[in-house]
Amino acid sequence: MKITANINNKNHKFIRFTALSCALLLVLFVAGCKANAQPITKTAFFFNTVITITFYSESDAALFPEVENLCRKYENMLSRTVEGSDIYNINHAEGDCTEVSAETAVLIEEALSYCRLTDGMVDITIAPLMDLWNFTNGEREKEAPSDEEIQRLLSHVDYRNVVVEDNCVSISDPEAAIDLGFIAKGYIADKVKEFLVSKGVKSAIINLGGNINLIGSKPDGSSFEIGIRKPFGTEGEYMDSVSASDTSLVTSGIYERCFTDGDKFYHHILNPHTGYPVENSLTQVSVICEDSTKADALSTTLLLLGKEEGLILIDATDNASAMFVEEGNVVTTSSGFKNQ
């Protein structure tokens, strides 16, 4: 089923960028502040990435150990590679019902809603294929798996095999496995923000490996300025920036984990219908949305759908906007992307 919505009344902006680019995407902050509110940056390693929290007071920064504990809790709950996590237990239950936390059950249901919305173009049972391609291992041989291997595992990719009943989750195909990578960091970013706000934090930048969640604005009341790096661009190159407060920005790109085998380029965003990296004109999608869980899920969803269907979906989604970057750094933004 195609994503359908009326987009005739939308004013899409088309901008062409012609500069050459080559390197990983990072999101940069121009976070100027008052002399008496110098930023304090704390870092740690979770979710297979560096997380960074920028605070604007010593008392706020003192909360960082509690943030680390919160991140550890969710990594131990939602990571499919951490033995004993809810997702690990589901994937190793051989089809039996697995009791999970209420949070895990709700997040799986939300992830499944994107599977249903896109007719399986997003599919949380992609995990066996992700393992086969193994983009996360920097030491792996840079060779694509065989088509025979891909097709064998592709037969086990079907989100409809996942059943959630209250806090019980099962997968009817014992050879299938769940991966929540397209939504989990956004959910955790929301939980970190919720915790910090509950402790009275008014200004902070939460950066979970490029998943950005902003608390309020800068101490002087001005917006944060978020720079968006060019796909494949050299460090320090960025293609645009947005002024934003108390919202989230998440970017998905095909250059974050990738390799070339012969003359063929492969990246980590897999098409669940083919088992191969998705092929369309897009190299990157950035989504701005107050809800970081939604922003995270949408950034990957839109990249998988491609620009045409992606624009239809983002226009039909309340309180969210997106920037689509195509090959050649051609940019299309949905209405309101620059007005956050």
Image: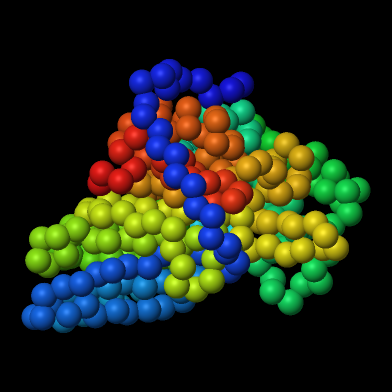
The residue depicted at 88 percent of the width and 48 percent of the height is 147
The residue depicted at 77 percent of the width and 72 percent of the height is 140
For the N terminus, give its image quadrant: top right
Q: From the viewer's perspective, is 254 left or right of 58? A: right
Q: Is residue 273 above or below residue 71?
A: above
Q: Could you tell me residue 184's position as x and y percent?
A: 47, 54
Q: From the viewer's perspective, is 92 left or right of 245? A: right
Q: Could you tell me residue 16's position as x and y percent?
A: 49, 47
Color encoding of the figure? rainbow
- Can I make out residue 135 in this image? yes
The residue depicted at 52 percent of the width and 40 percent of the height is 302
Q: Could you tell me residue 98's position as x and y percent?
A: 57, 47
Q: Is residue 234 above or below residue 277?
A: below
The residue depicted at 54 percent of the width and 71 percent of the height is 234
Q: From the viewer's perspective, is 33 left or right of 7? A: left
The part of the image, by quadrant, that contains residue 174 is: top right
- Can I make out residue 86 in this image? no
